[in-house]
Amino acid sequence: MDRFEVLIVGAGPAGSFAAEQLARAGVRVGLFDGRLPGEPKACGGGVTSKALKAWPHLLEAVGRTIDELDMYSPSGKHLHLKLDEPFAVYSRIAFDTFLRERARKAGATVLAEKVSARACKQTGDGWIVRTQTDAEFSGKHLLAADGANSAIAKKLAGPLPPAEMEVAFGYRAPLPEVGDAATVVAFLPNWVGYAWAFPRIDHVSFGIATTQDAFDHESLDKLLWDFMVSYYEVAQVGNLHPRMDLWKRDKSQINNLRYHNLRYTAERYAARIPGLSPRTWDTRKACGEGWALLGDAAGFADPVTGEGIYYALRSAELFAQAYLAGEPLAYEQSWRKDFGAELRRASQMRRRFYGNFWGAPFTDRMIKFARGHRGIRKVLGQLVAGDQGYTDLKKKLARSALKPI
C-alpha cells in the first residue's frame, strides 16, 4: 500500500493547485486524476482578472486574453464593454493540464486512477482509499476536489438539494471562417441565467447556464442554437462590433440550412454547478477531522454567474496555508472570512439580479443605464472582471449614477 500524507481526489484547478502548494512545502501528496486522457471539463473556461492578478503565472497557460465584451439584455439591448482589466479564456484541457503538470513538477504524485466514495474509509491513522483498479493508498488527510457531483463531499458534508444546483450545457464549435470572434454574454429572456460565446485558441465555447429547477432542455437548446446562428451570421458581416439580433425571431433558426453541418460537428457538453442558498452557506461545513472540500465540491461558485475557478484556486490556497501552519481545521474560518460573505451575498442577490426592477428585468435596466452612463458602465466592467463584489454593488451603482456622465 502506497502511503501519502495528503490524498487529493480530483485534478482540476482546486486539486492540482492544492497539490502544488503542499508539495512545494515538502508534503507527500497523492493526486488522483480519474478523467480519461483528453476528456475536457464542461466549462466556459473564463478566468477573471481578479484571478490573473492573484496568480500571474496563470497567464503562462495557453489561452486567450479578452479585453472587450458584448453584452445583451433579455430584450436584446446591446452594450459593448471595453474592460480596464482583461480576463482570460482557456480550454479546460489546456488549463487543467497546465496546473496538474505544475503540481507534478512540485513533487506531487499524479495517479491516473478513479476513486469512489464507497472506497474511502477513515481509520484511526487517517484514510484508506481503493481505486477502480483495486490499488490501495493511505494518507492522513483526504481532500475532495472532484467537482459539484462529488460523492465524497456528499459522504463527508451531506448532499445538496437539487434546487441548489445549476446546469450548464453547450457546444464546442469552430471559430468563424471570416470576421471577428467576439466574446458575448447574453442574459436569457424568461429564464434565470445567460448564454455565452467564449472564443478560445482553436474553437468557440457556446453555452447556457441556468437553474436546475427551471431547466427545460428542448426550449433552452433551441434558444442556444438561435444564439449560435446569430453569432456566426454577425461574424459574416465583418463589422468591428456588429449587433446580434437576439431573442426576437418568429421562427427558430435551429434548422438554418447554412449551419446544417454544424449540428453534427459541434461537440456537446453539460455539467452541474453549485448554487448554494444563504441558509446553506450558514450551515454547510467544508472541513472536519482529517478531511476538507475544495472548489465546486465544497459549493464554492458564484450563485449569480456560476463562476468557480477563482474560488477553486483560492480555497486550495487557503487550505494549504492552514495545513502547513499545523491547523487544518482553521480552513473553515479562513474561507468564510475571505470569500464566504461575498458568495452568501451573491446567493441573496440571485433572485433580484434575474428578477424585475421598475417593471422590467433588472439585467435589462442595468444594460440600458450602462449604455448611457460611463460610471455604471465602469462598475459593470469591474463586475465582469471579478473586481467588483456583490456586497457593495448596489451602493457603487447608485454612487456612479449620481456622478456626471
Image (cartoon, rainbow, N blue to C red):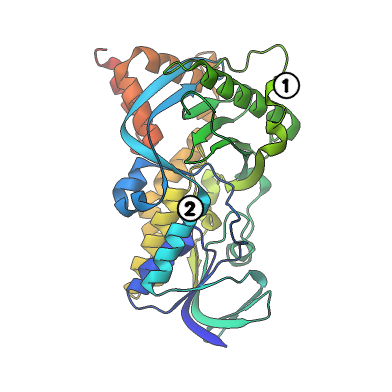
Quarter occupied by residue 240: top left
Direction front: furthest residue: 177
* Residue 331 seen: no
Image quarter of residue 136:
bottom right
Q: How many neighbours does mark 1 have within 10 angstroms: few (below 14), some (14-19), or many (20 or more)?
A: few
Query: Where, quadrant-wise, is the C terminus in this rendering?
Result: top left
Of residues 147 and 338, the one nearer the viewer is 147
Residue occupying the point 53% across, 25% down: 186
Per the image, label 2 sits on a secondary structure element best described as helix
Give residue 257's mark.
1
Foreground mark, 1 or 2, reads: 1
Q: Is residue 365 left or right of residue 174?
A: left
Query: In the rendering, at what x and y percent does residue 104 appear?
Result: 43, 70
The mark total stands at: 2
Residue positioned 54% across, 47% down in the render: 279
Q: Is residue 206 above or below residue 360?
A: below
**Which residue type does callout 1 highlight?**
Leu
Q: Which residue has dot 2 on it?
A: 94
Q: Is residue 69 visible?
A: yes
Residue 161 image point, x, y percent? 66, 50
Of 313 and 42, the residue lying toward us: 42
Residue 174 position in % (x across, y down): 58, 35
Place of residue 402 in the rendered image (x, y in percent of width and height, measured from the top left)? 28, 16
Q: Give the vertical position of 97 relative to 210 (above or below).
A: below
Q: From this view, report whether residue 25 is shown above or below residue 169.
A: below
Residue shown at 39% from the left, 42% from the top:
48
Instruction: Tell me which residue sits at (46%, 39%) in the image.
Output: 346
In this picture, residue 184 sits left or right of residue 385: right
